[in-house]
Amino acid sequence: MDKTDELLLNQIAELHGVPEGSFNIRKNGESIARNSTSDIEIVPKSDKSGINIIIKAGVKNKSVHIPVLITVGNFKDVVYNDFYVGKYADVTIIAGCGIHNATESDSTHDGIHTFHLEDNAKVRYIERHVGSGDGTGGKIFYPVTRVYQKKNSVMIMETTQLGGVTDTVRKTYSTLNGNSKLIVKEKLLTDYGERAVSHFDVKLAGEDSSAEIVSRSVARGNSFQHFKSRLVGKNRCFGHVECDGILVGNARICSTPAIDAAHKDASLIHEAAIGKIASDQLLKLMTLGLDSKQAEDTIIHGFLE
């Protein structure tokens, strides 16, 4: 790996070289490093591009890294990864992709991830997308995440995209069974003419299942964001969706909620707040010695933390 690879790995997975434990590092459509352990096995698919990640029952305090790097233009990468998480397992999965494109042609990564959580399993899933390079070619991401949760399981998703990505459409589908829980924390920053669409489709099928989806986003320049959510309560359940956005410049943010209470004991909530940075916040920081740009950046950084 060269310096560009190392920088991308640090940005998307906080790695400084090859990690310990189970991992699969993918670059420009090929696996360049892979390791399995007795607790977490990584098996290449035989019928299409991608891997199966098999996490044994009862595994605790383990992590697996599956970062993707793209460093060429005129390239489209599609990968299918399936995660099988055994009963009572508790693991952290660090994914994400970095595209460094210095060409005039687009580079695209489509990561299709499917999670199967058995009873009482818990997953913390961290996904970061980064775009860099001074070429005019696009840095494009179209990820799809599907989550199937059995009883008493917990899925925590932390997704981050903080600039440099030309176009992204992120789709997340989740089905929850009895007493299972989904928690999503999305952080998003767009600038210039970038576009970002987030689409969540969550089915609360089991009794006492719950979902909490919180999106915090900042749109700068002439960028466009669209937050879409569909929450369906098919049993006694609780669902909460929150979309908070800050507008800077000529940017635009849309929020399109859909709530379907298909059971008399379903409790579903959607909240949305979109607006510009308050002038009194800027003024307060500027009285402390910051210029307007520094004050704006400080507020945005705090909002996205």
Image: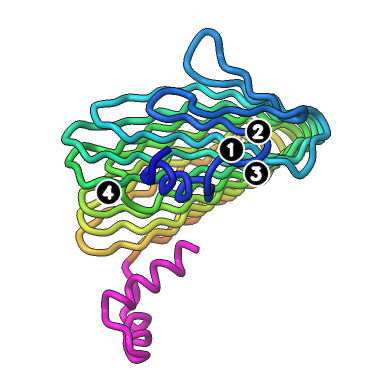
Identify the disc placed on residue 124: 3
- Looking at the rendered image, the disc whose residue lies closer to the viewer, 4 or 3, is 3
- Judge left or right: residue 227 versus residue 61: left
- Mark 4 and mark 3 lie on one chain; the one further toward the N terminus is 3
Instruction: Give the overall secondary structure of the magenta segment.
Output: helix
Q: Is residue 85 visible?
A: no
Residue of label 2: 22
Q: Nearer the viewer, residue 22 or 227?
A: 22
Q: Nearer the viewer, mark 2 or mark 4?
A: 2
Q: Are marks 2 and 4 in contact (CB under 8 Å)?
A: no
Q: CA distance from mark 1 to mark 3?
A: 12 Å
Measured in 3D between alpha carbons, the distance from the residue under mark 2 to the one under mark 4, in whole angstroms, is: 37 Å
Q: CA distance from mark 2 to mark 1?
A: 7 Å
What label sits on residue 224 in the rendered view? 4
At label 1, counting other C-alpha atoms closer than 10 Å, the crowd grade (few under 14, some 14-19, many 20 or more) is many
In the rendered image, the vertical position of residue 111 relative to residue 252, given as above or below: above
Q: CA distance from mark 1 to mark 4?
A: 31 Å
Q: Position of residue 174 (x, y in %)?
A: 58, 32
Q: Is 81 situated left or right of 293 in this image?
A: right
Compared across the picture, whether 172 is left or right of 73 comes to right
Which region of the structure is painted magenta? 276-305
**Are the residues tagged 1 and 4 within 8 Å (C-beta)?**
no
User: How far apart in space, not on screen, are marks 4 and 3 (Cα)?
Assistant: 29 Å
